[in-house]
Image: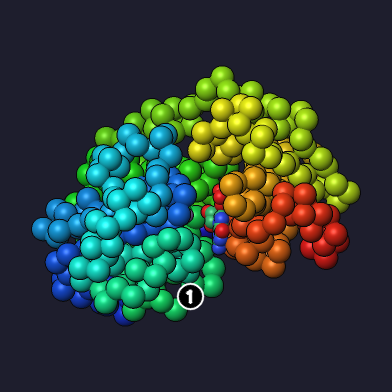
Amino acid sequence: MNINILMLTTIISEQEQNLLQQAIENSCNVVIVAHVAPDGDAVGSSLALSGVLKKLGKQVEVVMPDTLPKSIMFLQGATDINIYKNNTERCKNIITNADTIFCLDFNEPKRVDLMQEDLVNAKAYKVMIDHHINPSDFCNLIISYPQISSTSLLVYKILNQLGLEEKVQKSEAEAIYTGMMTDTGNFSYNSNDSDIYIAISQLLQRGIDKDEIYKIVCNTSTISKLKLNSYAISEKMEILDGGVAIITLTRNELNRYSYQKGDTEGLVNQPLGIEGVNVSIFFREESDYVKVSLRSVGDYAVNIIASELYNGGGHKNASGGEFFGTINEAVTLIKSQINKYI
Ligand code: 5GP
Ligand code: MN
């Protein structure tokens, strides 16, 4: 057996490497954008890349469609991120005047929600760095590696390949680690790639405190959040034949527990801990649509359900979408179609 002890494997092709190097060299006003409802990976990869590009002397702005979860605001640079929803005119200007736009952690313009039109119309050279399957063709350079567990790890591997690892210091390392951790459920799924642990070892050498990051990002409960999640499991979970768990929360129920954005993060994963449950679907009623989150284990591909029934997509074991109708209709739909998928 040939054991590779401490070297990350290379990821991007020589052609991608050359094009990316050129894009960075030619850039001056860089904008980094990520998907709506940004998660640890979207924010982590964006802040890490932003930190490195700033050290190369670039003017860099990060723009996200809407607000970040509180639990990742500790990352350096998080408070400087421009939020399109809150500051639309400024964000429009930033996007219009960019010469280079990096699109991180998403594969189609729809994923930036309200920013979609500005992004598509921007004249900048666009580079996608992402790990979702089936990237759509809206960027000049598409660097898409769905086999990599997080965009943050992909960015880290790319920075290494470009010889920029010296620019990855503690704050960038914290951002990368956060994205790697959140996109693998604290290294509990999609996490058998040995490069993950080589990367972690290197990030630790830059002074990150991974135990502290876990505490900050994951131990963020409040009384009302814990009660809401307990209520959802005890009163609103249904297990269908075939090992499919369904949880629904209406607007009324969310309000009853003073729901704050992020309060149901992770809820959809919980039923998968039950023996025999292979698919879990969570429906949350928003003001004008129903947000659907899907998770599975093994070979059950929930991204197909997300795209065929709920205008969404994502990864085989973790995906999401939106349903435009009532929450009851959203549930009826899956109940009537589930046999097709299971
Ligand atoms: P979550 O359930 O945490 O919102 O989303 C899980 C994963 O599903 C995300 O990382 C993303 O890849 C994908 N996803 C969530 N919502 C959507 C959506 O509306 N459209 C698409 N294409 N993917 C989504
Ligand atoms: Mn991701």
Q: Position of residue 222 (x, y in %)?
A: 52, 22
Q: Is residue 322 left or right of residue 83?
A: right
- Relative horizontal placement of residue 201, taking residue 133 as reference (left or right): left
Q: Residue at x 68, y 26 (%)?
A: 230
Colour scheme in use: rainbow
Tell me what residue is drawn at x 73 percent, y 58 percent: 300
The x, y position of residue 259, in whole percent, is: 56, 32
162 shown above or below 233: below
Q: Quadrant of residue 214?
A: top left
Residue 22 vs residue 250, the one in the foreground? 250
In the picture provided, is 272 more to the left or to the right than 8?
right
Which amino acid type is marked by label 1?
Ser
Q: Which residue occupies 41% across, 35% down?
A: 70
According to the image, label 1 marks what residue?
A: 136
Q: Residue furthest right?
A: 241
The answer to whether 271 appears left or right of 118 in the picture is right
Label 1 neighbour load within 10 Å: few <14, some 14-19, many 20+? few
> SS at mark 1?
loop
